[in-house]
Amino acid sequence: MRRLTTAVGLATLVSLLFVPHVTAQDDELVTLRIGLTQDWETLNPTVGFAVSEYEIWNLHYATLTDKAADDFATIPGLAESWEESNGGLTYTYTLRQGLEWSDGEPITAEDVAWNVNTAREQEWDNMISAVANIEATVVDERTVELTSSVPDPKLPTMDVYLVPRHIWEPIATDYDATTQYEALDGVGSGPFVVSDFAKGQSVTMVANPKYWGWGGDTPAIDQVIFQLFENPDAMVAALLQGQLDAIHGFPPGSAEALEADPDIEVVAGQQGGFDEIAINGGAVDGQPHPALLDVAVRRAISHAVDKAAVIEDLWFGLATPLEAVSPGADTKWIPDIPEDGQFGYDPELAKQILDGAGYLDTDGDGVREMPDGSNPIVLRHAVNTDGDQAAAIGDLFKGWMEAIGIGVELESYDQDALYGVIVEGTYDTFFWGWTPFVDPDPMLSYFTEAELANYNDANWFDPEYDRLYLEQKQELDPERRLEIVHQMLTILHDAAVYIPLYLGPDLQAYRTDTFEGWVRQPAEIGPVMFSNSSPSYALLRPIGAEGDGGGGPNWALIGVAAAVVVLGGAILLGRRRTGADERE
Amino acid sequence: MRTSGSDRLTTETTTARGRGRLVRRKLLGSFLTLVFVLVFNFFLFRVVQTDPIGSLFRGRNVPQETIDDLRTAFGLDEPLITQFVYYVRETAQLNFGVSYQSRQPVWEGITTAVPATVALVGVAAILSAVIGTIGGIVAAWRRNTWRDHAITSGTMVFYAMPDFWLGMILLVGFAVVLGWFPVAGIVDAGSTASGLARFADQAHHMFLPALTLTLAYLGEYTLITRSSLLDVMGEDYLVVARAKGLRDTVVRNRHAVPNALLPVVTLAAINFGFVLSGAIAVEAVFSWPGLGKATADAIRGPDLPMLQGLFLVFSASVIVFNLLADLAYAWLDPRVEP
């Protein structure tokens, strides 16, 4: 009897595992499923910083001004118009009629003013750089005035996430209280609002009918589900099987499999992010090898770097070569370096430059020395063990340098330790990357003297560059500002302390048979999701009948389950029962 | 029937006072170990000259004063000994602080992830112990037959495989190619199922990772049980049992196995202690939202409060289960001195 019970219990347990799971998902809901590999630490827009988090906020919170999909131009958002006054120091914004939060409360100038002023007073991490010099005043229910104490070329752009005052004001009593708030109230003003957050698993957002941008239409999508995958290959498989509609951040090696599928479109989106090899410019205590202080040597090194090989081998051709630093999301900020000024891959030229400058290999050991014959040129290249490509690039760099007679010693550091090494200057070169903001100012500041021992990881500065930096910081004429920035970046380029390798793409893919209307930001070259203002979601429409999620043929599962049950039963029931005489 | 030691020893361990002394001594030992772990944990993470706040903000457009304020708020610019005193005080009150990355209490972050890991690794730990032990028993009893060879080499093959590699093979085979199981997660994302349907969904998601871990751990139990039982099989009292006419399986299950299980019990207890530390690699392969992932994320910061909290929880778990193993062993085997 006991064995029978055990057998039945075991069989039930096993078959439970094969029960075709009935999820209570309503098949009537139009659901967009996105796969990504970056988790969400917090959904609080004042402090988070992960790309995955920004995407949620882009959908959940509308902003005063919006950004055009083509070129990041400032366009009306919650504000339908604005007027400049006071020599560009003051902007008066008029909000649209009838704006409401997703819970029905009206969105008023009070909301805007409270956000700007509180963010400034409490120094919210994510907003402080935009509002540090700005005072907001309510003129009337639909009108708010922003006044800057210094000329600010970013205005009238005001794209900080505006949180609902009626929810946040009682909570946000000080910096600590604000930053610890989990922000899961679900009240927002964007096209979708958060309805569920399972940390480490998924974020579910539902359409917000009160969003101003629907223009009177009903939202075409009811629900957006972002699903986290620890295993990027599993994510690619899920897209190929139709369980997902789009994915962000797949490994470059999967591009081929995705491109082979006729129903999938691969996007290598550019948002101005780039990777570089940085040379120690010698402006802090830790000194580089003395040869690196000679700009001729740095230029020679630049000529010996084979960017095309890197793009082909490590990125499967999906990245774009880069000559000068990209300081902003829009590639317009990158100066056009004339061809005779470029540092193209030419190891022979590199050798000639070094020979001409007197760095010869006098003792025939394959490594050049300083002009006086001392101090063989061996560079300490720091490898960032937390970076995906750093190890491979380190090896490539060693090969390139040895080909022109410069030795390389690879030293490994984790990201945090590397940061310390850079600040102290105890390195010669390293490989890392940046993802700039829309406005180039922050990235430009990183090469100024003020940022030494902080963000200036070129350990270099130039007085002319610094002067131009201050100029562009307050230049309100966009064309003139662009010129100044180009001049600055040309100075930086010619100094050859930063060797930009390529514009690193955001690797994304979407199914062409489930939803249509994907928009690239910026136009033609940008990603379709996880971009600066994520315009696609409000524009997507389902194609015909929604595809079913992938799922196994359940008859196979039931067959296996049945076999296990039968087998288990046979084994267990086949034993003879214990007789009384065999019990002790 | 068990062989007994000297009368004095038997008296010592079987009196209530004798047992009490034993338990008290072991409890004290465990507590001291925990305290040592606490101290060691704190200094371990600070040996490397890290700047967790600085690294948190690298590349972000945050003014230096804000970063400095945050550093002060987290007490990171205080002398090390002050930080240590603060740490001991707070930990004694079970306040593990706030995570640098999520700004939420560390305790919450840990307890959210615990059920997923305990479910997955716990089930695998139990299954591997049960199945592995049974396999070891059969292998020993039928030594040198095909059963023995099949069981021993089979479990050793799985034991030798890296667990994440085995997981990937199973994932590709059963989830991607055949599509019988989901490729990631603990439930279908966005599912609003509840009750039995949700449980079935979770079980469906858990099957492959649990299978991976069970197969990976089997070998330990099989080998230990097998060798332990082989030792016992040579004992005289089994000859007596057979002579009495008892059936073979009864001799095996009622007389041989119980005495052979002592090392297995210890092994199982120790393994259960490691359940919380989870299986980082397998959790990653199956996108299982457990403590393994929480640990990997915290290391990246380094999110010091989170790491301290996690390591304390892991250490406490191992210490507690070691204690239980110790006590169970003393209770099961009267030969053990108090």
Image: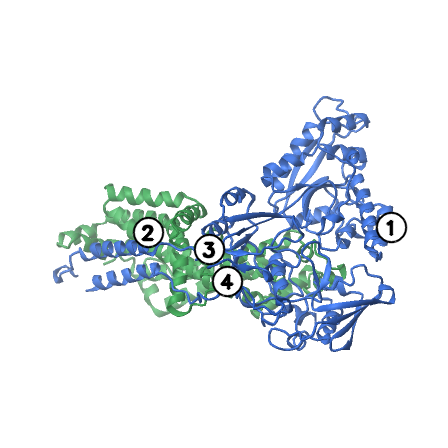
Q: Residues within 10 Å of mark 1 (few under 14, many from 20)?
A: few
Cα separation, mark 4 vs mark 1, equals 52 Å
Residue type at mark 4: give it.
Thr
Residue type at mark 2: give it.
Gly
Q: Which of marks 4 and 2 is in front?
A: 4
In the figure, the blue chain has which letter? A
Residue type at mark 1: give it.
Arg
Cα separation, mark 4 vs mark 3, equals 11 Å
Q: Which of marks 4 and 1 is in front?
A: 4
Residue named by callout 3? A243
Tell me if residue A201 can be seen.
no
Label 3 close to label 2 by CB (< 8 Å): no
Task: Count up the numbered dots.
Answer: 4
Q: Tell me where residue A372 sits by quadrant.
A: top right
Residue named by callout 1? A467
Q: How crowded is mark 4: few (under 14 residues within 10 Å), some or many (20 or more)?
A: many
Cα separation, mark 3 vs mark 2, equals 36 Å
Cα separation, mark 3 vs mark 1, equals 54 Å
The residue marked by circle 4 belongs to what chain? A
Which colour denotes chain B? green
Residue named by callout 4? A31
Task: Specify how the rendered protein is coloured.
Answer: by chain
- First reached walking from the N terminus: tag 3 or tag 1: 3
Which secondary structure, mark 4? strand
Numbered mark located on residue B132 in the image: 2
Which secondary structure, mark 2? helix
Q: Nearer the viewer, mark 3 or mark 2?
A: 3
